[in-house]
Image (tube, helix red, strand yellow):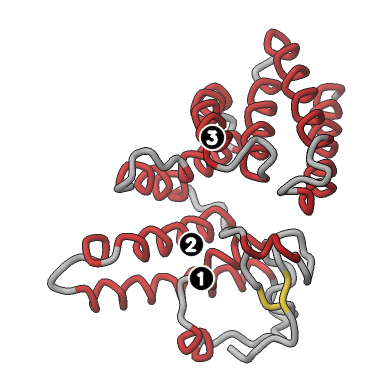
Amino acid sequence: MAQSPGVRYSQGKKEMGDSLKFPWEYPVPDNKFWHDISFSAARNFLQNFSPEELDQLPIDPESPLEKRTKIELLARLLGELLEKREAEAVPKTYYDAYFVGWDRLWLAVYTMQDELGDPDAERTLRMLCDRRKDKTNLSHQHTLAALLLNRGKYAEAEEMEKEVKTWLDDRLGMESPQALSARRIITQALWKQGLSRRSEADEAISELMRIIDGMTGGRFAVYQEEERKMTKQMVHTLREESSV
């Protein structure tokens, strides 16, 4: 994979200032191959490879391939990497030899499954939740709640994400992109459970907007406008769906 002339970060920006210190930021190549692949999918794939391994990948930065074909390629490369890592770990399993790498690689596998609409995506993510070594780490539950929401399992998504929201508030702060994302998941889960939960959803929306308005000048200020945009779009979509 040839070097890219530039990179982009989580909001599509080429410069993130001090926000580059946040562990979720990652330089994704800014070229034709990666341009229509989400930041999270690209990051979750790329961070599994060393610079030397990345240089050897059969990825053409000017590739005209359709997005699905590219995702299928990334999924295949991850499968090959998983086999390689397992072989290198013998006589141990990769899980036992290097859990952090195992967890990161399987998260990337899940990401591609989700992008492809693979029904095994939920099973993979639940496996990651079940096999995590630090049972206090709820990052995979956060991802699982979003998946459950998208699959119409609203009550389960709500209950799971309430616990995640508290964890994220304590760990990163309620103004963090992750904690705001948790609130959006809960809001949508409430709204989609019907009119009986609509007032709770409205309260959650008001709380979201208050938190976002308070981000000005704070630690996560660089994300403020994007968070406001995503929240307004969420509200618009929910109300539009309700009017149909």
Quick check: marks 1 and 2 in contact, CB under 8 Å?
yes
Position above or below: 238 against 118: above
Task: Give the foreground label among 3 and 2.
Answer: 3
Q: Earlier in the sequence, mark 1 or mark 2?
A: 1
Q: Which mark is residue 47?
A: 1
Is disc 3 placed on a helix, strand or loop?
Answer: helix
| Quadrant of res 215 | top right
Whether residue 123 sits left or right of residue 94 in the image: it is right
Task: Give the foreground label among 1 and 2.
Answer: 1
Q: Give the CA distance from mark 3 to mark 2.
A: 26 Å
Residue type pointed to by label 2: Ala
Q: Earlier in the sequence, mark 3 or mark 2?
A: 2
Residue type pointed to by label 1: Gln
Q: Which residue is mark 3?
A: 170
Q: Position of residue 32 (x, y in %)?
A: 74, 79
Residue type pointed to by label 3: Asp
Task: Give the foreground label among 1 and 3.
Answer: 3
| Quadrant of res 168 | top right
Q: Which residue is mark 2?
A: 108
Q: Residue at x 47, y 39 (%)?
A: 141
Q: Split into 4 quadrants, where in the image is the N terminus?
A: bottom right
Is disc 1 placed on a helix, strand or loop?
Answer: loop
Q: Nearer the viewer, residue 124 or 18?
A: 18
Q: Position of residue 177 (x, y in %)?
A: 67, 45
Quick check: marks 1 and 3 in contact, CB under 8 Å?
no
Q: Earlier in the sequence, mark 1 or mark 3?
A: 1
Q: Position of residue 7 (x, y in %)?
A: 72, 76
